[in-house]
Amino acid sequence: MAKLDTLIGCHVLTGVNFDTCYVEEDIGDASVMNFVLDGVMYSAIEDASDGYRSSMSELRVTTVRATRKMNMFSPCNVIGSMRVGDSWILDLEDVETKKIVLSVGTDQSDDWYPWFVSKFSPENMSSNWRTLSMWGGV
């Protein structure tokens, strides 16, 4: 099992997808965010066992073949940092655009109602900014 804070620093992001996995009978399915950093696939799995509240249950190192479909793209150089405050969230920021491309973890982790964060913003990737500016969008 991996930990979010071990992903602080420079990386290359090459894939992201969202999925669900079966947890157990009383709970059902949990949300999963898969992402590929430096050729290694990580699966952030939600702990949805408490109805309205949720959090990130665990971060697994898995294989790309384990997913149904993986959205792969041109390498994106990112810097990982942990968000400061009442959260346990890893933000991956594009080196060129300085915008957050991926966020994963638990927000309001010290509060009564924490929630699972799994956000991918491909519009913030430098490769997409170059494409948009070529078409006059930026």
Image (spheres, rainbow, N blue to C red):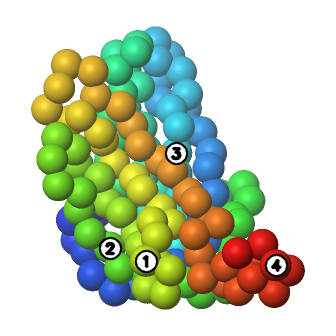
Q: Which residue is mark 3?
A: 32
Image x and y of residue 9, in percent: 27, 81
Left or right: 50 in relation to 119: left
Residue drawn at 75 percent across, 82 percent down: 133
Q: Residues within 10 Å of mark 3 (few under 14, many from 20)?
A: many
Q: Secondary structure at mark 1?
A: loop
Question: Tag 3: residue type?
Answer: Val
Contact between marks 4 and 1 (CB within 8 A): the answer is: no
Q: Residues within 10 Å of mark 1 (few under 14, many from 20)?
A: some
Question: Tag 4: residue type?
Answer: Gly
Q: Residues within 10 Å of mark 2 (few under 14, many from 20)?
A: many
Q: Which residue is mark 4?
A: 136
Pair 1/3: label in front: 1
Q: Is residue 107 visible?
A: yes
Q: Which residue is mark 2?
A: 80
Tell me which label, 4 or 2, sits earlier in the chain: 2
Marks 4 and 2, how far apart at CA: 30 Å
- Please give the label number shown on residue 22: none
Left or right: 132 in relation to 10: right
The one of 98 and 69 positioned closer to us in this rendering = 98
Pair 4/2: label in front: 4
Marks 1 and 3, how far apart at CA: 26 Å
Tell me which label, 4 or 3, sits earlier in the chain: 3
Marks 4 and 1, how far apart at CA: 20 Å
Question: Tag 1: residue type?
Answer: Lys
Q: Secondary structure at mark 3?
A: strand
- Please give the label number shown on residue 98: 1
Q: Secondary structure at mark 2?
A: strand
Residue drawn at 55 percent across, 28 percent down: 29
Image x and y of residue 34, in percent: 53, 58
Contact between marks 1 and 2 (CB within 8 A): the answer is: no
For the C terminus, give its image quadrant. bottom right
